[in-house]
Amino acid sequence: MVRSDARENRARILAAAREALGEDGGTSMNQIAQRAGVGPGTLYRNFPTREALVLAVYQDEVTRITSTVPELLAQMSPLEALRHWTTDLVEAMRRKHGLGDALGPGAHQAMSEQSYGPVIAAITQLLDAGKKDGTIRSDANPGDFLQLTGALWRAVSSPEDRAPHMLALILDGLRTH
């Protein structure tokens, strides 16, 4: 069993890394340790490589996002829950882009493979709730939805962010008529 201080250190390191790498993908491991208030030894004991740390930050974010589905469905209609959840996913993907600067191609592949199953399961839960209440088309497919929404995190352009409009079009296509 992991001691509570070790769990707290790990959580502080992940939070500091998420923030630091989101601001600058080139942030050093030592800067992250300082920001987390831990020594380099504690950092490297938890995350032996930079890549391990970045992957853990990403996985932590995926877990956070996918775990919000039941609460969203309890608070709002399936389509509205899907809108909120997807907006959160898009923001995370935009942050991940900054994290991605710190990774090599193999780690990008690992990130995609680690997150695909949990993300598809979350989308399935949201779509199934809408199919059950009759608001989402019965042929809506989680993989198709994920592929369509993949364009949203790239839709930031000046002077405006097109993602909300694009998401509205995607969600309109899911509605039963």
Image (cartoon, rainbow, N blue to C red):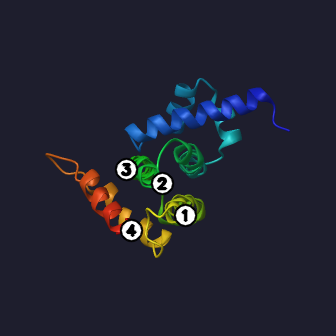
Regarding residue 66, the answer to whether it shows in the image is: yes
Q: CA distance from mark 2 to mark 4?
A: 12 Å
Q: CA distance from mark 1 to mark 2?
A: 9 Å
Q: CA distance from mark 3 to mark 2?
A: 24 Å
Q: Secondary structure at mark 3?
A: helix
**Residue drawn at (19%, 51%), measured in percent from left and top?**
157
Residue holding disc 2: 78
Q: CA distance from mark 3 to mark 4?
A: 30 Å
Residue holding disc 1: 132
**Of marks 3 and 2, which one's residue comes earlier in the chain?**
2
Q: Amino acid at mark 1?
A: Lys
Residue holding disc 3: 94
Kindly indicate the quadrant of the structure image that contains residue 117.
bottom right
Residue 160 percent location from the top left of the image: 17, 46
**Of marks 1 and 3, which one's residue comes earlier in the chain?**
3
Kindly indicate the quadrant of the structure image that contains residue 170.
bottom left
Q: Is residue 41 left or right of residue 137?
A: right
For disc 4, the neighbor class at 10 Å (few under 14, some 14 to 19, many from 20) is few
Residue holding disc 4: 176
**Of marks 3 and 4, which one's residue comes earlier in the chain?**
3
Q: Are marks 1 and 3 in contact (CB under 8 Å)?
A: no
Residue 18 percent location from the top left of the image: 50, 39
Q: Are marks 1 and 2 in contact (CB under 8 Å)?
A: yes
